[in-house]
Amino acid sequence: MAVIGRRAVKRPGRLIAEIITVVIAAMIAFPLYWMVLSALKPAGEIQEANPKPFTVAPSLDSFKRVLTVSGFSQYFLNSVIVAVAVVALSLLFSFLAAVALTRFHFRGRTVLLVMLLVAQMVPVEALTIPLFFLMRSVGDVAPAFGLNELGSLVLVHLAFSLPFAIWMLRGFVAAIPVELEEAAKLDGASRLRFTWQILFPLVTPGLVAVSVLAFIHAWNDFLFAKTFIISKTENQTLPQAILVFFKPEDTDWGAVMASSTLMTIPVLVFFVLVQRKLVSGMAGAVKG
């Protein structure tokens, strides 16, 4: 009876927690629902003074207008190139840096760790203008990474992704026992072989978490894309493509919502594919 009584006491608290969770989830999902709904609404319903939370005549006209816009496929390809490059380079450099900062002791190691932590605290907006002039100077030496080139976006996103990625992976690398490396050495494995064939697979959850965060940051970016891709329209990315439908006199909100929906799909697909390892990766980062 005492056990049943304790369970009965816990149930109201658990019920309240579940209700709060559902309410928060609904609040987060509602903007996505409204975005997709607006993309499916006919133009007349979107411009109604009192919009309804449903539509009786869904239409794909907005998606057709978006997909037929000149250069949309190129914008999509540019976003894919930038995001994939940022993810790949972030994984490579952050893993090697995490190994170096965890397994080796050298002068300035603590200072470097503090600098990585401080770098995450600087607002992106505060660095945009200095980075603009930096990329302009880089373009004089390496044109592929200068202004109006996709390489400039890759470099800037990489610079902002690495500090957090290194800190996250450092916890995973530190969780791997040193005795495992010593055992590998006794079996004749070199440090390089241990790093790539043993250590790298063991920190896979952390690598997945880093890849998701780097992908989302690069894919959804508008500020850097607008700042560094100025006049070369063929190198613009998807967030800039949405601006095509913004007009001072008459904004095409259906197309804006349709393009936003199309832009969200790759992120959702990527997240669904790696969600399990992402959760374990976040948990591992907290433990580390």
Image (tube, rainbow, N blue to C red):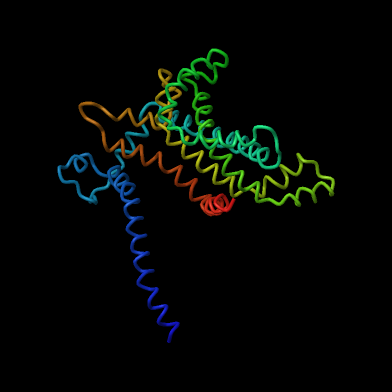
Vertical arrangement, residue 243 with respect to residue 282, above or below = above
Please provide percent x and percent y for residue 12: 35, 72
252 or 64: nearer the viewer: 252
| Residue 158 shown left or right of residue 246 in the figure | right
Q: Nearer the viewer, residue 177 or 196?
A: 177
Q: Against 91, is 12 above or below?
A: below
Which residue lies at the image location 54% right of the left edge and 51% below the top edge? 286
The percent coordinates of residue 11 (x first, y second) are: 38, 73
- Residue extending farthest top: 140
Furthest residue in direction left, as rendered: 49
- In this orientation, which residue lies closer to the viewer: 35 or 164? 164
Residue 35, x across and y down, in percent: 31, 44
- Identify the residue at the far bottom of this view: 1
Q: Residue at left 65%, top 39%?
A: 101
User: Number of numbered discs present?
Assistant: 0
Q: Position of residue 1 (x, y in %)?
A: 43, 87
